[in-house]
Image (spheres, helix red, strand yellow):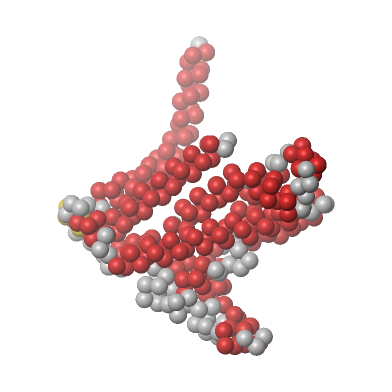
Amino acid sequence: MSGKLNLRNALTGYLFLLPTFVFLVWFMYYPVYQALIGAFTDWDGFNAPRYIGFDNFVRLFSDEVLRQSTVNAVIWVVFAIILAVIPPYFVAELIYHLKRARAQYVYRTLFVLPIVIPGIVIILLWRFLYQGDGAINQLLELIGLGSLQQLWLSNPDIALYSIIFMGFPWISAFNLLIFYAGLQSISSEVIEAGKLEGATGWKRVWHIDIPLSLPQFRLILVLTLIGSLQNIIPPLVMTNGGPGYATYVPILYMYNVSTVNGEFGYGMAVALIMFVAILLLTIVNMKLVRSDS
C-alpha cells in the first residue's frame, strides 16, 4: 500500500513539473537544435532551406564585419569585467564597515533600489545624455571644458567606449549583494586573528577580505563574461552597430544578418559558434563554483 502511495505522489510531482519541462524543451532546447541544423543550410526564412555543408563556417573566418565585431566584444568584455568587479566591491566594503547595522541596511537598499527601473529606460536616458546637445556636453560647457565636447555616439573612435561606460557609477546591485554576502560570511575568529597580526584597515582588505572573497570574484567574473557576450540591447538601441561597424558585437551582427539581410542560415552559424563559446564558459563557471563549495 505504501509503495502505491509513493508512486502516486511521485507521479503527481512529475505531473506538476511536466509543463516546465515542455516549455524548457520548446523554448530552449528546440531553438538550439534548429540552429544546429540550420547552420549548415542556406535559408532566407521563407523558402525551404538548402543544405550547403560547412560553407557558412568557412565564410565566418573571412568575414571582416564579424572579425571587427569580435574585437569589439573582447574590448567590451575586458572593461565590463573591470566595472563589474571594482566599483561594486569597493562599495560593498564601505557598507560592510559601517558600524551601525541600520546604516548598512539603508545604504544597501539605496544601491539596490535602481534595480526596479527597466534596463531599456536607463539605456534611453543615456542615449539622451550622449546627444550633441545633451546633458554631458552642456555640463562640460558649464564648467569651462567645452573643448572636451564630443559627438559621443557618432564618433567611431569613442562610440563603443561611450556605450561601455554608460551607467555611472557602475554599481551593479546584483554584484554588490554578492560581494556583501561574501564579506558577511567571513568568520569573526578570522577577523580577530587578523587584528592580532596587525591586519586592520587596508591591510585587512588586502590580506583577509579579498582572499576570502575569491569565490565571489570568480562567480562574477564568469557571469560577466557570459552576460557581455549576450549583450545586444545597448548597441542595438543606442547605435544599431554604428557608426559604420564601430559598435557591432557578434550577437548584434547575428541579429542583423538574419532579420535585415535575410541570411538565417549564416546567422544560425554565428549563433552556433556563440552558443559553443557561452556553453564552455558556463561549464567553467560550474566547475569554479563547485570547487569552492
Could you tell me residue 44's position as x and y percent? 23, 61
Q: Is residue 58 above or below residue 17?
A: below
Identify the residue at horizontal 39%, vertical 64% (top origin).
71
Could you tell me residue 108's position as x and y percent? 71, 55
- Which quadrant: the C terminus? top right
Observer-nearest residue: 139 or 119? 139
Residue farthest to the top, as pictured = 1
Task: Judge left or right: residue 5 versus residue 170.
Answer: left
Could you tell me residue 273's position as x and y percent? 33, 53
The image quarter in which residue 283 lies:
top left
Is residue 116 visible in the rendered image? The answer is no
Is residue 185 visible in the rendered image? The answer is yes
Task: Judge left or right: residue 97 versus residue 162.
Answer: right
Could you tell me residue 4's position as x and y percent? 48, 15
Q: Is residue 59 above or below residue 145?
A: above
Identify the residue at horizontal 48%, vertical 24% (top origin).
10
Q: Is residue 162 above or below residue 39?
A: below
Identify the residue at horizontal 71%, vertical 41% (top origin).
186
Identify the residue at horizontal 49%, vertical 44% (top origin).
285
